[in-house]
Amino acid sequence: MIRTIAVREFKSLFSSPLAWLTLAVLQFLFAWIFFSRIELFLQYQARLRSLDAAPGITEIAASGMFTVAGLVLLIITPLFTSRSLAEERRSGSLKLILSSPVSLTSVVMGKFTGLFGFYLIIILLLALMAFSLRLGGPADIGQIITGILGLILLSITCISIGLFMSSLTAQPTVAAISTFALLFFLWIIKWDVKTGGALATYLSLQEHFTSLMSGYLASVDVIYFLLLSILFLSLTIWWLDWERN
């Protein structure tokens, strides 16, 4: 059942121009960033050689592109997740889903998987550009893989939060704004460390994402994203189950 719902969700995304236009615009944007950063590296390559622990082309081109991609995914998430359950609620089809014998876990995970499939296409295109660095010389494959993992973990977390916000309202616009507000809050929460201290640092999306972009794979970062995703997916299932009962 999860697969059926996921395929339906994935196809519905591409039934409108939004998904196609988003892919086209993002591909152009990321390609421009990628090649401009390669040009920047080549321009300053001689100076970088004289520096201790100077950044390599992987860090400048690939990780730089991945970092921008993370911010972009943060921004576009509300556009896609807000329609998932809020639109179903507004059209009345959510009542049919809640009254059907289909498991709510299957419904939520199906929609999550369908949305993640779209994000996976974006990440795959980014990965192809990053791995193309190997054609021109040595590149840090480990840092590229860590960056890709960071994008995947950020994506599943953003989708999970977006689905929960979408389950709370019948207005996609309200769901989009609230999703962006929460994601933005989690991104900037570390900016004023004095008010939150260690807790603010741990809750910061930016902190854990930046750590992965630097090529440092730590279990604390992976666990953070997984826990946050599981939490919001569970809250979505719980909320829909409360409505059903």
Image (cartoon, grey):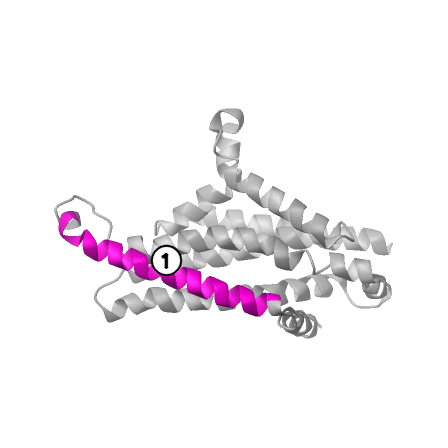
Foreground residue among 65 and 243: 65
Specify the quadrant that holds the N terminus. bottom right
Tell whether 115 sits left or right of 211: right
Can you tell which quarter of the image residue 10 is in?
bottom right
Tell whether 141 sits left or right of 195: left
The residue singled out by tag 1 in the image is: 33
Which residue does the image show at 75% across and 56% down from the upper left? 86
Count residues near mark 1 (Cα–Cα under 10 Å), then give few for <14, some for 14-19, many for 20+.
Answer: some
The disc labelled 1 sits on which kind of residue? Ile
Q: Is residue 34 magenta?
A: yes
Q: Residue furthest top?
A: 194
Which residue does the image show at 34% across and 58% down from the upper left? 62
Where disc 1 sits, the SS reads helix
Q: Main secondary structure of the magenta part?
A: helix
Tell whether 242 sits left or right of 19: right
Span shown in magenta? 18-47
Q: What x and y, as percent, mark residue 228?
A: 58, 48
Which residue does the image show at 51% across and 38% down from the upper left? 188
Task: Say if 54 sits above or below 118 in the image.
Answer: above
Q: What x and y, as percent, mark residue 236?
A: 71, 53
Foreground residue among 90 and 120: 90
